Amino acid sequence: MAIEVTEAPATPGDPPGPARRVPVLLPLLAAALFVTGACGLVYQQLWLRELSLVFGVTVYAAATVLAAFMAGLALGSWLAGRLIDRARRPLLWFGLCEFAVGAVALVTPAALRLIEDLYVGLSGGPDTPLAVLTVLRLVLGFTVLLLPATLMGASMPVVIRAAVSHSDELGSRTALLYAVNTTGAIVGTLAAGFYFIGEFGVWTTFVIAATGNVVVGVISMAVSGRIGVREPGLDEVAAPASDAASTPWLPRLGVGAQRAVLAVFMVSGFATLALEIVWFRVLVLYLESNTYAFSAMLATVLFGIALGSAVVTPFLRRRADWYTVLIVLEGLLAVVALGSLAVLAEAYRVIDLVGPAYDPFTQPSGRFTVVASLLTVFPSAFLMGVAFPIGVLLWGNTGDADAGDTGRRVGLFYAGNLIGAIAGSLVAGFVLVPLIGMQGSVIFCAALVLGSALLLVAMAPDRARLTAAGVASVAFVVVAVAFVPDPYAAALANRHPGSTVEWSKEGVQTTVSVQVEPDGSRRMYLDGLPQASTAPDVVNLHRIIGTLPIVLHPDPKNALVVGLGGGVTAGAAAAAGDAQVHVVELSDEVIDGAAYFDDVNYRVTSRDNVDFRVDDGRNYMLITDEKYDVITADIIQPQHAGAGKVWSKQYWQLARDHLTDDGIMLQWVGGADRPDSVYKMIVRTFLEVFPNATAWANGQLLVGTEGPLQLDRATLRRTLADPRFAEARAAAGITSVDALLGLYTAGPAELRRFAGKGPLLTDDRPRIEYYRSLPKDEPFVDLSGLRGNVADVVR
């Protein structure tokens, strides 16, 4: 398929008027949009990741960054739509935009360092209200993302304007280009999430994506120098007046109906992002919380949209009542969105599809992620993909053959859809899920989509014929709502059979439940994954993590604990001494749930020497000047999504900077359950920051100090003799000096020899979080050779 464009006049003095037509293959524009779609999703993942290092990984921080990014896209679409219809060479402007996106991406790391300094300077410290910090994050997010996102948002209206020379091409070519652009986004999502970041790191991934934009920009500018685009107003000259009459299938909508179409796709943007957030919150109940699960789900959404657009493309130049088709699609979308919860409630049955030897609840796998996403997310995304180009067709066609205002109308349409998406991302995370839960949120979105379908019915020329269909749709959805299961209850029942839910709460950050297991133990689950337990071995390890640094420090006045979980670590630190313990926890709901573990956590939530802050631990340290005698953390698995931010050289450097001169940093690193290369990589990285680090508890714990650790037996004896804290210390197994020193494993020299040389964990190379880049089928670490002489640290 080819499009007709015009060659620009050879010299500035050439007379105006119709220029000579030259064929340009549509695949040229499609290829450009494919690459820009891929690069755009790569950037989105990179920017969200990098800005989370500054703003934190709370939902509030992530949502404000996403809103800033999408606002830039909306602004770009709107501006491009207003300006591109007057441009002689849309390809030239497209090329300039793409080149600029690539150039801006390459300076992003430097810009982020500047933004970090601004954020720290303007934040006012940790006592600043969350609302003020959220506004500050939004402003700074706009500062970083507005320019590149605006340039990216301009791409689609500009390319569609270049591709469409006649109004009867609008629907089919928009659908084709939209499908190609979304397919590129799928490739970018999977490439960045599954390969580039893990294999090459964040900076190199920036370079790869920027190279793609620059190449597209250079080629587009080069082509535009040889091949121009019609002069403004050329469509009236080139297209016969009879063209409009020769295409009687073109919609003839009134102003009210067209505005209804625009409103419907603002609602569609809202519902798409809101459902995406809710779907991920539900899917993670069945999957391990890792970065690959999110990438797979996002790719599934994009795949559905791309396939839907591709499927409808050949039909959009045929005679059809597309307005009625859109009404039907919106009604189906409402029903299918509701059905996604019913399907997901039974998602565990996909075990029969992915292999009889595979248990999706104990062995999370990419296969299960893909199948579960296809069953639940794909149908709705497919309908969205079918509906979008139909909406462009209905909105973009004014009844004239002239395509002279195509860019303006398409730009406004995209901007409206993105504005809805911004609202959906914010409202779903901050309001809907905490207020009415995941089940209620999906029902709300489905009702909103159905309401948009009824709006179309109300504005339809043949209203009577469609009213019956609208009433039937409402009745069907009302009945369907009665059968929509609670996804969280279904997930817990399927994933943890035999357990009893004692308490649960859906919050902004996570969904937390406390359950009594068949063996009588109590467990806390975050998004369906175990976070805390009253099992004796688990409780004992947490007590050691909290107690050991308090005892090792000669006189601890304060301590920082990152993460609360069941509260045993923080409670042990508070009960083992008289230090004031400051706990930074991401979720209010976790703090509420910890009260159910009072029998093992020393009633941590009601102790006078414990205070709480709901925040990201790394972000808190970034904006506070306070120094601590002890810094430790609850057990945080490094392979979980977002955990790389607290398993990196930069994080431990930040913690070191917040230690007093004789302060102690204790880090749980795991033990014999770690692959050999993973354990050694963690140790090497910790030694980079704390060269005098020592290992304790059979190598499960690393203790970092500024200078060599020197323990005095007499001081330890006096410390352990204090009767006020004897019970708590005994519960951790530290009943005497010998018992304490019996936990010692190795010193810095032994650790350095054991870990050897190799890669480190950094913000740029989060290797464990992106664990698919690690060696496969590697044996677990053998810690039997990691032994030192305790006399090296005792005098």
Image (cartoon, rainbow, N blue to C red):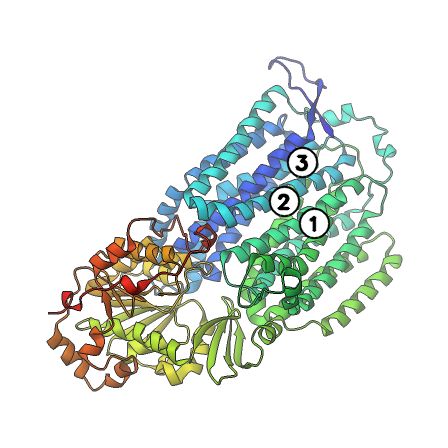
- Residue depicted at 51% across the width and 81% down the height: 517
Q: Amino acid at mark 2?
A: Thr
Q: Label 3 vs label 1: CA separation?
A: 17 Å
Can the viewer see residue 672 in this picture? yes
Check disc 3: other Cα within 10 Å, few if <14, some if 14-19, many if 20+. Answer: many
Local SS, label 1: helix
Quarter that holds the C terminus: bottom left
Residue 385 numbered mark, or none: 1
From the image, tell me which residue sits under label 2.
182
Q: Is residue 742 left or right of residue 300?
A: left
Location of residue 656 (image quadrant):
bottom left
Secondary structure beneath disc 2? helix
In the image, residue 109 sits, relative to residue 570, either above or below, namely above
Of mark 3 and mark 1, the one earlier in the sequence is 3
Residue 410, by quadrant, is: top right
Tell me the crowding category of disc 1: few under 14, some 14 to 19, or many 20 or more residues within 10 angstroms, Cα based. Answer: many
At label 3, which amino acid type do we have? Answer: Ile
Q: Distance from label 2 to label 1 (Cα)?
A: 9 Å
Residue 512, percent across and down?
Answer: 50, 73
Category of crowding for the residue at label 2, using alpha-carbon neighbours closer than 10 angstroms: few (below 14), some (14–19), many (at least 20): many
Q: Is residue 538 above or below residue 102?
A: below
Give percent across and percent down for residue 402: 76, 32
Of circles 3 and 1, the one toward us is: 1
Which label number is shown at residue 160? 3
Q: CA distance from mark 2 to mark 3?
A: 14 Å
> Decide: marks 2, 1 in contact (CB < 8 A)?
yes
